[in-house]
Image: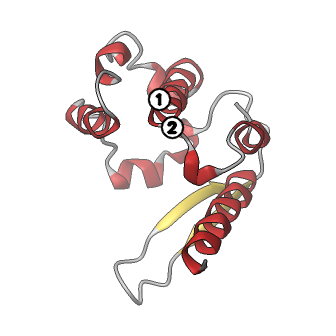
């Protein structure tokens, strides 16, 4: 799913149903298990149907309980393994200064950042009303 599809499908980001949220999260997992070098090796080892049973809170517990954690140093050194094959997006590299917590390094897709701005704006507008 492209970020434009998310904006089109979920016009009001604060009113996305729990079921739609679970469906979208499952699509993300399916996509990365099929297309991302690091996660491909877990295909067949992760039971998504089991993980995505129950209420949303339970789904998040199941995700964490599945042990799908990535060591921060491994991620930093092997970040290209986390790019889906044939990825065509624009990636930005960000590094925090470390003034408020330890220094952090991350890579963000530019379109994802634009999507986050839309969600944040909607949230702030709702909060300010």
In the rendered view, tell whether residue 69 sits above or below residue 123: above
Name the outermost residue toward the left.
65
Does residue 95 appear left or right of residue 3 in this picture? left
Between 30 and 20, the residue placed more toward the observer is 20
Compare residues 99 and 21 and report the one nearer the observer: 21
Q: Residues within 10 Å of mark 1 (few under 14, many from 20)?
A: few
Task: Using the image as rendered, state which of residue 30 and residue 129 is in the foreground.
Answer: 129
Q: Residue 15 placed where, x, y %?
A: 57, 48
Kindly identify the residue that appears in the image at 30 percent across and 23 percent down.
Answer: 51
Report the number of numbered marks.
Answer: 2
State how far apart marks 1 and 2 are (Cα): 5 Å
Colour basis? secondary structure
Q: Residue at x 58, y 66 (%)?
A: 123
Left or right, 8 with respect to 106, comes to right
Mark 2: few/some/many CA within 10 Å (<14, 14-19, 20+) = few
Name the residue located 43 percent from the left edge and 49 percent from the top edge. Answer: 75
Label 2, secondary structure: give it. loop
Quadrant for the C terminus in the image: bottom right
Quadrant of the rendered structure where residue 73 is? bottom left
| Residue 102 drawn above or below residue 25 | below
Q: Position of residue 39 (x, y in %)?
A: 45, 27
Q: Quadrant of residue 10?
A: top right
Q: Residue placed farthest to the bottom in the image?
A: 99
> Residue 19: which disc?
1
**What percent of the width, then of the height, locates residue 45?**
31, 14
**Marks 1 and 2 in Cβ contact (< 8 Å):** yes
Residue at x 53%, y 61% (from the top left corner): 106
Q: Which label belongs to residue 17? A: 2
Residue 43 lies left or right of residue 123; in this view the side is left
For numbered disc 1, what is the local secondary structure?
helix
Q: Is residue 79 left or right of residue 109?
A: left
Instruction: Quarter of the image for the N terminus: give it.
Output: top right
């Amino acid at each position: 799913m492209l970020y434009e599809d998310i904006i089109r499908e979920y016009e009001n980001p604060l009113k996305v149903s729990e079921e739609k949220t679970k469906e979208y999260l499952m699509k993300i997992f399916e996509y990365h298990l099929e297309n991302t070098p690091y996660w491909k090796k877990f295909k067949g080892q992760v039971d998504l149907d089991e993980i995505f049973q129950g209420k949303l809170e339970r789904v998040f517990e199941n995700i964490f309980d599945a042990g799908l954690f990535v060591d921060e140093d491994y991620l930093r050194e092997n970040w290209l393994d986390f790019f889906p094959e044939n990825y065509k997006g624009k990636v930005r590299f960000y590094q925090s200064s470390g003034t408020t917590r330890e220094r952090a390094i991350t890579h963000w897709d530019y379109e994802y950042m634009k999507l986050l701005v839309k969600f944040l704006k909607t949230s702030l507008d709702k909060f300010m009303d």
